[in-house]
Image: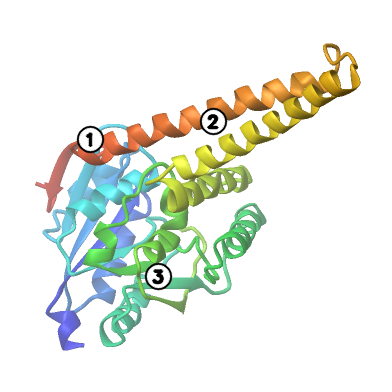
Amino acid sequence: MDIVTHSLLSIVVPLYNEEENVALLTQKIHESLIGYDYQIIYIDDFSTDKTKQVVKAMNDDKVHLIELKKNYGQSLALAAGIDYAEGEYIITMDGDLQNDPSDIPQMLSYAVNDEYDLVTGIRQKRKDSLVKKIPSKIANYLVRRVTKLDIKDNGCALKVFTKDIAKDLNLYGEMHRFITLLAHLEGAQIKQVPVKHHARHAGVSKYGLERVFKVVADMMLLLFIRKYFQRPIHLFGIFGFLLILLGVFINIYLLIVKLGLGQDIGTRPLLMFGMMFILGGIQLFTIGIVMELLIRTYYESQQKRPYRIKKVTIGGK
């Protein structure tokens, strides 16, 4: 425990319209982390209520407020907070008081004593509506089936990361849903622990059934990035080559029919399919080459953050 208490912790919490929750959340974090050295990093994702005013009014030196210039979504808000964080261990959680800060010390002990790179929560007796539970169960099932990563609750926001793993996540889009999978792809050793879960204290949930479709789309993108991001020609080139080969075989067959049997092939639909396969294959192969050049340009160019910070406030000043 001495190692933990002498290490700086960064609690990263994205906020969007949480004016009724943020003060109580801050109080609970303070109560749960007595004796620890920590900073609370709130990222205001362009809230339309008085969230940032409430945070500033606390005048709390442990509270850092990052104000984003527009609404970027939870993934980029998390990315901004993680980039700003200075702690040896980075803790992420939601701002709606459904996560319980009192679970943090136990999770930290696993990260430090057992040297796990990521300790993630499994929400016990979830206090959510079916509108949130059903998409979550579908998403967890899809992740397990497609990626073979046995994580029981990918949607739990309460996580403890080592600094190195957290800062290598490269969050964008809405990839916060797959933050555990991203850490796994970075080589993280992962521990799952049961954590408490509460009903939302105040405000309105931002999730619905459309989340299932977003999860499927994001997973397809993630799998492409995992396997083919560095070499897209291996995906598009192979499919393109197979289509060209199929088209050539079809046309060779038709040529034999024309020359050997003297039959008319000009009106056959098979001729059209043969030409379409060849042209489609050439297009896919060309796309692979273009993407290969784009990826090379991406790696050689200077990386820029996909978000813009308007202002950073420490202790309400």
- In this picture, is 31 found above or below 223? below
Instruction: Look at the numbered discs 2 and 1 and tell me whether their residues touch, using CB distance below 8 Å.
Output: no
| Mark with earlier residue (3, 1) | 3
Q: Of the residues tagged 3 and 1, which is closer to the observer? A: 1
Q: Secondary structure at mark 3?
A: loop
| Separation of marks 3 and 2 at Cα, in angstroms | 50 Å
Q: Residue 90 sits in which quadrant?
A: bottom left
Q: Disc 2 or disc 1, which is closer to the eye?
A: 2
Residue 100: mark: 3
User: Which residue is nearer to you in this view: 302 or 233?
Assistant: 233
* Percent x, y of residue 196: 47, 74
Question: How crowded is the residue under tag 3: few (<14 C-alpha within 10 Å), some, or many (20+)?
Answer: some
User: Left of 33 or right of it: where is 22?
Assistant: right
Kind of residue at badge 3 = Asp
Q: Nearer the viewer, mark 3 or mark 2?
A: 2
Label annotation for residue 284: 2
Sooner in the amino-acid sequence: mark 2 or mark 1: 2
Look at 47% across and 27% down and name the residue there. Answer: 286
Q: Are dots 3 and 1 in contact, CB under 8 Å?
A: no
Q: Residue 148 placed where, x, y %?
A: 56, 67
Q: Amino acid at mark 1?
A: Arg
Where's residue 300, x and y in %? 21, 38
> Which secondary structure lies at badge 2?
helix
* Residue tagged 1: 308
Which quarter shows the N terminus? bottom left
Q: Which mark is residue 237?
A: none
* Mark 1, secondary structure of its residue: loop
- Chain-order first, disc 3 or disc 2: 3
Is 209 or 167 nearer to us in this picture?
A: 167
